């Protein structure tokens, strides 16, 4: 179990993390989301023991982690941190990199383990290739395999699929989380990509300006985002004054609706004017103006500007 207790951290005098506390139970997968520069990587580095904190404490399975001022080798023994810069050895092969810290005492065991990892990251064909000759996405996959090699108990992933094309990304994510679940490895993933989060993480922690503003079951947080900032980390979102729907002028509340929660409806008395249609593959994203507010919703066909259309809001949210 990881316990992060009242951690604050500053680079020189610049405060980055403020009073961060949370607990993760064994085997849980946590997503860490927040705008660029909010402190996600810094938090992962603090947990892994690369940055010394003056304020707050960290515990792993009840034992206090003392950080870089106490450890001879930077980084906690039971953890692995996959940084955004992959830290591989460019002149050595993929298999040498993955097996770098594995014992060579039993060569067959070692090569079996390296092969298992190559399969997880779909790099079997590149086992003998020198890392310097790989693409950015391939290097990221090797770095992931290397991070898994010594069976960490806690895996800290910083934008782990950032350089990987969509074609591989989905299968890689599935392979990785299947492996983590099978081996009961706890994980924290810092990411900007909601597809990294929704299917794979149990809980999501939202960071804004170095503070935790929400920690919740991932699906509940997506379905009932606590605020506009949180909702927008999951994708496009509309913030609509409730008064537009209720007609009560002094109703200052707003509601948050994703584009798929608004529909065109010929029966609706709520009218919007179409501004643009954007082709999204499976649907069009329609930009329209409703009571002077720009909103986005999904539709199966394009709509022509400046057509006036009726719109309907998802009942579950627009109470
Ligand atoms: N070594 C450093 N020295 C000084 N300031 C730093 C250092 N590393 C990061 N920062 C600053 O700390 C803040 C948090 O950075 P961090 O990398 O943790 O953000 P992040 O949320 O991971 O961002 P991104 O999503 O863009 O990776 C930023 O303002 C950044 O400029």
Image (cartoon, rainbow, N blue to C red):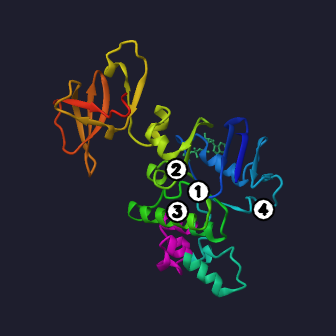
* Residue drawn where x is 30% and y is 21% of the image: 292
Disc 2, SS: loop
Q: CA distance from mark 4 to mark 3?
A: 28 Å
Are there few (<14), some (14-19), or many (20+) residues within 10 Å of tag 1?
many
Q: CA distance from mark 1 to mark 2?
A: 8 Å
- Camera-near label (4 vs 3) is 3
Which residue is labeled 2 in the image? 191
Q: Are marks 1 and 2 in contact (CB under 8 Å)?
A: yes
Which residue is labeled 1 in the image? 157
Report if residue 118 lies within the magenta region.
Answer: yes
* Residue drawn where x is 72% and y is 53% of the image: 50
Are there few (<14), some (14-19), or many (20+) residues within 10 Å of tag 2?
many
- Region of the chain picked out in magenta, as a range: 117-143
Say the numbered circle drawn on residue 177.
Answer: 3
Q: Quadrant of residue 170?
A: bottom left
Q: CA distance from mark 1 to mark 3?
A: 12 Å
Which residue is labeled 4 in the image? 73
Q: Position of residue 134 (x, y in %)?
A: 49, 70
The residue nearer to you, when weighing 251 against 304, is 251
The residue nearer to you, when weighing 52 against 195, is 195
Report if residue 317 lies within the magenta region.
Answer: no
Decide which of tag 1 and tag 2 comes sooner along the chain: 1
Q: Are marks 2 and 4 in contact (CB under 8 Å)?
A: no
Q: Position of residue 252 (x, y in %)?
A: 43, 17
Q: CA distance from mark 2 to mark 4?
A: 27 Å
Query: Main SS type for the magenta part?
Result: helix
Say the numbered circle drawn on residue 22.
Answer: none
């Amino acid at each position: 179990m990881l316990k992060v207790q009242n951690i604050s951290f500053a680079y020189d005098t610049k405060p980055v993390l403020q009073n961060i506390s949370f607990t993760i139970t064994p085997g849980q997968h946590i997503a860490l989301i927040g705008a660029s520069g909010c402190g996600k990587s810094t938090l992962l580095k603090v947990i892994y023991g690369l940055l010394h904190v003056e304020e707050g404490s960290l515990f792993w399975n009840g034992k206090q982690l003392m950080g870089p001022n106490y450890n001879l080798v930077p980084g906690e023994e039971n953890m692995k941190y996959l940084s955004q810069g992959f830290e591989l050895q460019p002149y050595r092969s993929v298999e040498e990199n993955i097996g770098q810290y594995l014992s060579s005492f039993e060569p067959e065991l070692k090569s079996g383990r390296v092969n298992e990892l190559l399969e997880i990251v779909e790099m079997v064909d590149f086992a003998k290739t020198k890392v310097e000759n790989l693409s950015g996405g391939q290097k990221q996959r090797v770095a992931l395999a290397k991070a898994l090699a010594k069976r960490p108990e806690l895996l800290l992933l910083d934008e782990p699929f950032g350089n990987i094309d969509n074609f591989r990304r989905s299968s890689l994510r599935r392979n990785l989380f299947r492996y983590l679940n099978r081996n009961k490895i706890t994980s924290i993933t810092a990411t900007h990509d909601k597809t990294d989060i929704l299917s794979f993480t149990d809980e999501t922690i939202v960071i804004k300006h170095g503070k935790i503003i929400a920690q919740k079951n991932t699906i509940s947080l997506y379905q009932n985002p606590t605020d506009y900032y949180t909702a927008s980390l999951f994708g496009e979102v509309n913030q609509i004054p409730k008064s537009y729907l209720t007609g009560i002028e002094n109703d200052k509340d707003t509601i948050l609706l994703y584009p798929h929660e608004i529909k065109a409806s010929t029966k609706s008395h709520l009218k919007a004017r179409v501004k643009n249609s954007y082709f999204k593959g499976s649907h069009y994203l329609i930009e329209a103006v409703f009571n002077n507010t720009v909103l986005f919703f999904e539709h199966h066909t394009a709509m022509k500007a400046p057509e006036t259309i009726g719109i309907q809001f998802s009942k579950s949210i627009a109470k």
